Image (cartoon, rainbow, N blue to C red):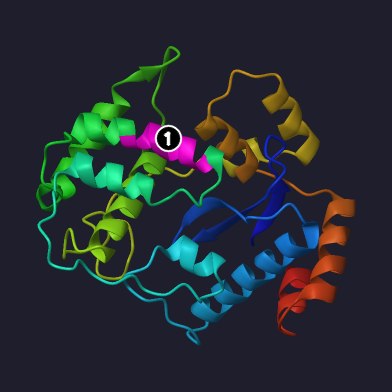
């Protein structure tokens, strides 16, 4: 299920949703509640169509951008044949420059992830030389490091590798590399396994999460992890159902929400 929230700093609505076992947060590009809910409905309809096999995602698109567009984002053309600098660091820089449409907090998080990726995978490494063994080594090395006295968690490392996957997909779409991302098998599943966090321990209400954020001291990954455990109370669930019932683009959407509620 996708969710919406307002970025208090910018006033823009943000959407969170899962695909392929990963959660992503993107800006809806609007400060209007009605427009944000239309984006929410389009994303959820697209996910449902993908899951039922009635819609197929192109292989050369960012899956999260494509879902957010309601399946309307066109594929980007491949390289025009000019010589490209295929060093991993240069590709990361080019990827970042192409992501200006994303919300500021998302870009900041990717900046942090890319800094660690470039440091441990080496900016000078040709992207096609980064294989699964290199990514396993990255995971081991990051797990030995510490942040504010605490070891780097599996959840943080996985988020960094999610950014690596997005960089790779972008690089493939733009002709820097031909192979599939080494993190994924032929069915799009992750080859590296990560421990799942204790879901019961992290479920919190909207107000509890906001209070923890307001106390400060949390980085973007820690804040995102709090929002992943959002638990809607009865009034919020009711408000969501009323909105879905009046705005759903297909008749099957409301019963799905009602059943989950």
**Quadrant where the image shows the N terminus:** bottom right
What range is drawn magenta here?
Answer: 106-114
Q: Position of residue 22 (x, y in %)?
A: 47, 54
Q: Position of residue 229 (x, y in %)?
A: 64, 43
Residue at 38% x, 52% y is 98
Q: Which residue is mark 1?
A: 156
Q: Secondary structure at mark 1?
A: helix
* Residue 126 part of the magenta-drawn span: no
Magenta part, dominant SS: helix
Q: Position of residue 33 (x, y in %)?
A: 79, 57
Residue at 21% x, 31% y is 120
Q: Quadrant of residue 121?
A: top left
Q: Quadrant of residue 155?
A: top left
- Relative placement, left or right, of 80 versus 49 is left
* Residue 111 part of the magenta-drawn span: yes
Which one is in front, 165 or 234? 165
Q: Is residue 42 above or below residue 27?
A: below
Q: Quadrant of residue 202?
A: top right
**Quadrant where the image shows the C terminus:** bottom right
């Amino acid at each position: 299920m996708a969710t919406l929230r307002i970025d208090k700093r910018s006033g823009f609505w943000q959407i969170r949703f899962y695909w392929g076992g990963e959660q992503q947060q993107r800006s809806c590009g609007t400060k209007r509640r009605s427009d944000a809910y239309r984006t929410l409905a389009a994303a959820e309809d697209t996910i449902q169509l993908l899951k039922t096999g009635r819609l197929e995602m192109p292989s050369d698109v960012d899956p999260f951008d494509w879902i957010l567009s309601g399946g309307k984002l066109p594929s980007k053309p491949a390289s025009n044949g000019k010589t490209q600098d295929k060093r991993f660091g240069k590709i990361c820089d080019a990827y970042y420059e192409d992501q200006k449409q994303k919300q500021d907090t998302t870009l900041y998080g990717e900046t942090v992830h890319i800094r660690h990726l470039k440091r441990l995978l080496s900016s000078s490494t040709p992207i096609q030389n980064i294989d699964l063994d290199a990514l396993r080594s990255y995971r081991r090395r990051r797990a030995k490091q510490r942040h504010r006295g605490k070891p780097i968690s599996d959840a943080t490392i996985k988020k960094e590798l999610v950014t690596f996957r997005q960089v790779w997909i972008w690089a493939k779409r733009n002709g820097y590399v031909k192979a599939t991302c080494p993190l994924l098998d032929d069915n799009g599943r992750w080859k590296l396994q990560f421990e799942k966090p204790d879901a019961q321990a992290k479920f919190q209400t909207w107000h509890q999460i906001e209070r923890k954020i307001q106390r400060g001291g949390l980085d973007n990954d820690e804040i995102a992890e709090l929002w992943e455990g959002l638990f809607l109370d009865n009034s919020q669930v009711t408000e969501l159902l009323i909105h879905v019932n009046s705005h759903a683009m297909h008749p099957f959407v409301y019963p799905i929400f009602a059943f989950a509620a």
